[in-house]
Amino acid sequence: MISIRTEREIALLRQANEIVARAHEQVAKMIQPGTCTRDLDKLVEALICDAGAKPAFKGYRGYPASICVSIDDEVVHGIPGKRALRAGEIVSIDIGVCYKGYYGDAAVTHPCGAVDALRMRLLEVTDLALSRAIRVSRVGNCLNDIGCVIEKTSREAGFDVVRSYVGHGIGVEMHEDPQIFNFDSGESGPRLEEGMVLAIEPMVNAGSGQVRVKRDAWTVVTRDGKPSAHFEHTIVVRKHGGEILSWCEVPSWGMREG
Ligand code: CO
């Protein structure tokens, strides 16, 4: 069952997602060569706690940190640690919080220093796929319209989407119905209704969309070792398109028009 949120609940979801957004803006400034991924985690955890919220990922199914940091061929769920960022890498930062019982969730992939043309294009296309997905998240469209536009945008650029991880409804749990595929599922799925709150999160690979999980049981990597990008926003379905609750001012988000 897909929940329809009241405006009172949406106001709380907006507060949770504003905490996520402000943390993204701060952590974006630390995406530089030499920064240790654990320091990114510590910064975000402190910001979340200072805002009176809780890091939603920490302890979720035993996940050991407050954020996910996924570098280059890592798709999602990379665990922060001793590893330092290097110039030329792309770095996905995924942040989730719980505030007054309501969840916020968003991810952005950043370039670290100067990156090659393939990686830059991968970021732009994944960002564009999410922007288009948000635009089609309007009353009267179908859930599958989201997956279709993400897959089409990725394929036209010569990239492939990850099929084994999906977006999700979000509200009083981090993961609620529905599952949001990043590809055409072949069925239109439920109609989108005003007040549905969705975390849309395209994961786009430069090579094949095939992935595997590393020995740490969390880190998802591409099978072919080529880079992957991930962008996520929490949105509310509205009449004219998705209203972004996790909007943040970082250089990597909203790079492209269209
Ligand atoms: Co999510």
Image (tube, grey):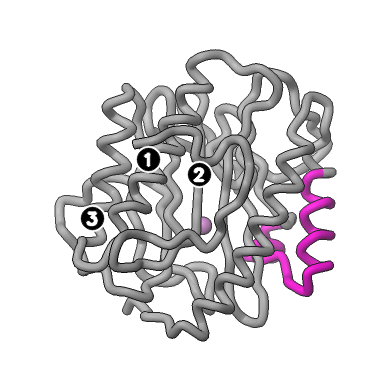
Which is more toward the observer, 191 or 14?
14
Q: Amino acid at mark 3?
A: Asn
Q: Report the quarter where the N terminus lies.
A: bottom left
Q: Residue at x 51, y 82 (%)?
A: 9
Give the labeled residue for mark 3.
144
Which is more toward the observer, 165 or 94?
94
Query: Which residues fall within the magenta stretch?
Result: 40-64
Q: Which mark is residue 231?
A: 2
Q: Report the quarter where the C terminus lies.
A: top left
Q: Earlier in the sequence, mark 2 or mark 3?
A: 3
Give the labeled residue for mark 1.
129
Q: Residue at x 78, y 74 (%)?
A: 52
The residue most toward the left is 187
Secondary structure under tag 1 reads: helix
Q: Earlier in the sequence, mark 1 or mark 2?
A: 1
Find out whether the residues at labels 3 and 1 contact each other: C-beta distance under 8 Å: no
